[in-house]
Structure formats: structure tokens, C-alpha cells
Amino acid sequence: MIRARVTGRIWSSKRIETIPKGSLLEVEAEGGERLIAFDPLGCAEGEAVLITRGSVAAGYFSDVKAPIDALIIGSIDEDG
Amino acid sequence: MIRARVTGRIWSSKRIETIPKGSLLEVEAEGGERLIAFDPLGCAEGEAVLITRGSVAAGYFSDVKAPIDALIIGSIDEDG
Amino acid sequence: MIRARVTGRIWSSKRIETIPKGSLLEVEAEGGERLIAFDPLGCAEGEAVLITRGSVAAGYFSDVKAPIDALIIGSIDEDG
Amino acid sequence: MIRARVTGRIWSSKRIETIPKGSLLEVEAEGGERLIAFDPLGCAEGEAVLITRGSVAAGYFSDVKAPIDALIIGSIDEDG
Amino acid sequence: MIRARVTGRIWSSKRIETIPKGSLLEVEAEGGERLIAFDPLGCAEGEAVLITRGSVAAGYFSDVKAPIDALIIGSIDEDG
């Protein structure tokens, strides 16, 4: 997994039907890489999150054909 | 997923038979990486798109052997 | 697999329910890349570890839907 | 997928038995990355090719255990 | 696949039980990346090898849960 920080959200009106309902958040990983992850937890901008990638991300969904390759699996606890 | 912009289209006359019918678009990802993605949505040059990669991209097709590792799953809404 | 060194641990109170019980360790790979891996072995900070990534990492868990894409599979023997 | 150019061919006399019969070509991807891909199409040195990677590459073979993670799926049409 | 050269071997006494019996070799890929691959062929230090990565590497093993994401599938023939 990678640690990343939420930087925004994207909207996509024109899209394939198998994208699950929910938020698609823009995140920036520790090394500076930017990606878009599905958020099942309701994370906010600036929140530190834990992201899993690849086919295991799609395994979260009941539809085995969910085309999701990056998933927020947790919010990372931060001090104070 | 990654955010990318459509930069062109490729044609391939000599190809394996399991490539699904449809467009293969050249895109440039946010970090500058260039890749080729299958487009089921009819996207145009310059359009901002959302791309999923790996085996989940192939899961979109009814032929489980579709050799597609990058798929445009949506067009990203942009202001004005 | 990659060789990495344990640099810390993360806690995540708000998380999806399919994350298996156990430690999530921060590691730094040989090339400097930082990632978070599930630790089934009880490794300590500073320990050199061997990490497998991708869907084979999830295969370790009895729950086939474990959203884990990086797993410590061994501690690397070091001299003296 | 990625666009790459064929730069050579490799031979391997000592190898595991599950490698399918056929050519293994050296290619250089657009970004400069070099990899080795299985070629089912009979491509020549200098030819521009389209490569798929990961488990979908192995899906091309009837033997589900083919250890191939990069496959040439087409030759890219080039002008003149 | 990638071309790499064997640079050493690692030992791991404390490890999960599903790692198959055999050698784990350190290799350096063409681009300088260092990784650890399972060796079913008995390769020596300095030997040029062909490596497959990801879930297809695990497919080599009869135990479908082998946590191996990098496998030496051949030794590359080199001239005199």
C-alpha cells in the first residue's frame, strides 16, 4: 500500500456504467505521484490515507467487474 | 486510476485477433508518462480522461481474454 | 520481491472492514521508495525484510477479498 | 498498453518448460524503458509495436500457466 | 519480462510458510532496479537472466498461494 494525501475530487458525467457509485478522490502519494482513488470512507481534503492498488482494489466491490485499480482502505491516524 | 489527456490515436492493421473492436488512444498521464488506452466512450483529442490499468481493465470486456491493460473509464468534467 | 527496511508503523482507526487484523508497517525499499506492507511475522523497526507485491500478496489471506497489495514474506538474514 | 520499438531478440537455452514456443523480442518503450516481450506476430527489428503487460499478457496463451508478462499485441501502422 | 544480472543470494530464516523451497536471488535489472527473484534453474552470480513479474510468476508453482512476484524463467544466451 502507499500513504497519500487527499488533494481534491473529480467528477465524471460521461463514463462507463460499471464504475461503482461513490467518490473518486485525487490523492498525492508520498513520492509525489498523483493518482485517483475510489473512496468508500468519506475522506476529506487534506486527510492522510492508505491506498491499495491493482486487482485487489477491485476485489472490494460486489461487482467483480468494477474497473477500480486504486482504493482508499483507511485513514491514517495522525497526532494532534 | 490516473488522470490523462488524449493526444492521438493509433491504428494497427497487423494484430492479434483477441483485441476488441474499438479505438486505441494515445494519452499522456499527469506525470508525463505516455500510454495507449482502449476507449469505449468516443473521446476526442485534448479530452481529460480517467484511466484504469492492469487486469481490471481487461475485466470490462465480455471476452475474458481481451489483452487490454489500460482502459478509459470516464471523461473528467472540466470547467468552462 | 524487493528488499526493504522497516521504518515505522501506522495506525488506522477509520478503515474498511476487510483489512485483516495485524500490523501495517512502513518500509523503505532499496531504491528509496516508501510503502506500507502487512506484517504477519512481527518484524521490528530497522529489520531488513523481503516484500512481495500485487495480487499475490492478497493470496496469503484466507479472505480472498483482503485488500492487501504488499506483504512481508520474510526477514532477511544479516551478518553480525 | 505502451508503444515500443523492437531492438533485438534474445535466446534462452536454459529455461523453464512452461515458456511458450515463439520469439522473445527486446523492445524499447517510448520513455526509454527496455523490456522483453513475447512476439506472436513475427515482428522485425525497428518495427513499432503495441505491448500489453501483466497477467492479461499471459491470458493470450492456451496454457494458463504461461509465465509471460509482456506481449506484442499489434504492429503500429506508420506513415510512409 | 526484464533482463537482469544475478548479483547475490539472500537467506531468510524467519519467513512465512508458503514461500516455496528454493533459491531467492538478488538481481539487478537493465535500468538499475534491484529486485529479488525466485530461481528454479540454479543460476550463478553474474549470469544474465530473464525475469517475469506479477501474478504470472506465482502461477509457476503448484501451490496457488505461493507469494512470489518475480521468477527467473530463463538464462539468456550470451556470446563467448
Image (spheres, coloured by chain):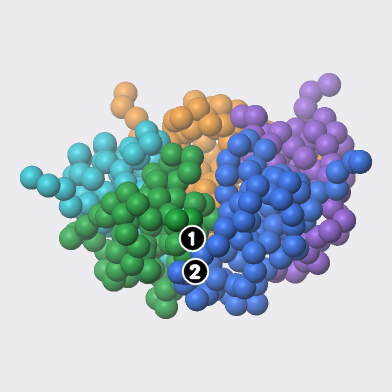
Chain colours: A green, B cyan, C blue, D orange, E purple
Q: Which residue is mark 1?
A: A77
Which quadrant holds the N terminus of chain A?
Answer: bottom right
Q: Residue D58's image quarter?
A: bottom right
Residue type at mark 2: give it.
Ser
Q: Residue at x 80, y 43 (%)?
A: E25
Q: Residues within 10 Å of mark 1 (few under 14, many from 20)?
A: some
In the rendered image, the vertical position of residue E32 relative to residue A39, given as above or below = above
Image quarter hosting the C terminus of chain A = bottom left
Q: Chain of mark 2?
A: C
Q: Are the residues under marks 2 and 1 on the same chain?
A: no
Query: What amino acid is labelled 1 in the image?
Result: Asp
E66 on left or right of D4: right
- Chain letter of disc 1 in the image: A
Indicate whether A80 appears above or below C31.
Answer: below
- Distance from label 2 to label 1 (Cα)? 7 Å
Residue A17 at what x, y percent from top left?
26, 68
- Which residue carries the number 2 mark? C13
Q: Nearer the viewer, residue D43 or E25?
A: E25
Q: Percent from the top left, x then y, of residue A34?
A: 39, 44
Whole-percent x, y for residue C62 in the image: 65, 77
Q: Is residue D23 left or right of residue C46?
A: left
* In-front residue for pair B58/B11: B58
Spot the residue most to the front. A80
Residue under the point 26% across and 49% down = B49
Of residue D4 and residue D73, the one placed in the foreground of this image is D4
- Element type at mark 2: loop
